[in-house]
Image: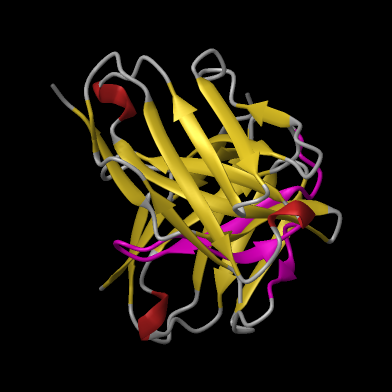
């Protein structure tokens, strides 16, 4: 199985801050990397596919980059609705696997 | 707008079979692949498996011997069966749609999730 490791596991930030989350794969996954946002008690919502392709309806303050083994999700100016947990997920090979999550909390 | 809704028992006894159904509305189940994902309380996401529009299935190896995913196109539903459950199978179970987007599979629509507790 491909292991996905996110860092940090949690971070504290303020509204307006730039936030960057890193996801590392245990082997190359090309650009088969998706990002999801999950709020407490809710299902995850897909933000980004193929490492850097913004899903319809997702604000442009979200951006993604990377290929191979190292990927980042950035939020250019954190908004109140962005406090949530973010997961990366590889779809390169079965079984699809998720990172452990990064919780973005209010500073 | 596609909507998914899980249904099934919220409590299952150890060694028994967990059975969940996902009802899809707002679109045909025949055109996509469908997946189950679970999340133990306070933990991360675990992909269980999927069934594609030809009926072919893929499962995560750690659960493969206990899992069956099937589709009932006449009811626009798909199902999950997990046998011989233990407390470690206690989780919120999500059903979801899988789409092919920019040359990549994504999980783009999710049910709200249902908590299944394994306890005597």
One can see residue B18 in this view: yes
In the rendered structure, the answer to whether residue B120 lies left or right of residue A89 reads left
Q: Residue at x 78, y 45 (%)?
A: B53
* Image spot of residue A23 (x, y percent): 58, 48
Q: Residue at x 81, y 44 (%)?
A: A30
| Residue drawn where x is 36% and y is 63% of the image | A42
| Residue A29 belongs to magenta span | yes
Is residue B104 depicted above or below A20 in this figure? Answer: above
Image coloring type: secondary structure
Task: Please report the bounds of the magenta region as a residue range.
Answer: A28-55
Q: Nearer the viewer, residue B24 or B57?
A: B24
The front one of A74 and A84 is A84
Figure quadrant of residue B78: top right
Quarter of the image for the N terminus of chain B: give it. Answer: bottom right
Image spot of residue B30 (x, y percent) = 75, 53
Q: Quadrant of the C terminus of chain B?
A: top left
Compared across the picture, whether B46 is left or right of A59 comes to: left
Q: Is residue B43 above or below residue B103?
A: above
**Residue B39: where, in percent of width, then height?**
38, 42
Q: In this view of the protein, which residue sits in the foreground, A66 or B117?
A: B117
Residue lying at the far right of the rendered structure: B103
- Residue B41 among magenta residues: no
Left or right placement of residue A44 versus residue B85 in this view: right
| Residue A94 shows in the view | no
Dividing the picture into quarters, in which one does residue B58 lie? top right
Residue pushed farthest front?
A: B74
């Amino acid at each position: 199985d491909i292991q996905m490791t996110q860092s940090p596991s949690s971070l504290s930030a303020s509204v307006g801050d730039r936030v960057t989350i890193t996801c590392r794969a245990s082997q190359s996954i090309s650009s088969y990397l998706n990002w999801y946002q999950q709020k407490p008690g809710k299902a995850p919502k897909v933000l980004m596919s193929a490492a850097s392709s913004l899903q319809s309806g997702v604000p442009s303050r979200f951006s993604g980059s990377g290929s191979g083994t190292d990927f980042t999700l950035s939020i250019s100016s954190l908004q109140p609705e962005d406090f949530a947990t973010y997961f990366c997920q590889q779809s390169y090979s079965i079984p699809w696997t998720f990172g452990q999550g990064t919780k973005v909390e209010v500073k | 707008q596609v909507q998914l809704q899980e249904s099934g028992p919220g409590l299952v006894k150890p060694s028994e079979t967990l059975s969940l159904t996902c009802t899809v509305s707002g679109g045909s189940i025949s055109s996509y692949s469908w997946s189950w994902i679970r999340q133990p309380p306070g933990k991360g996401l675990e992909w269980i498996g999927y069934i594609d529009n030809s009926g072919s299935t893929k499962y995560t190896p750690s659960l493969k011997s206990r899992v069956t995913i099937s589709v009932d196109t006449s009811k626009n539903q798909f199902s999950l069966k997990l046998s011989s459950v233990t407390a470690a199978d206690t989780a919120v179970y999500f059903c979801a749609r899988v789409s092919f987007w920019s040359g990549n599979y994504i999980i783009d629509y999710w049910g709200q999730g249902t908590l299944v507790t394994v306890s005597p």
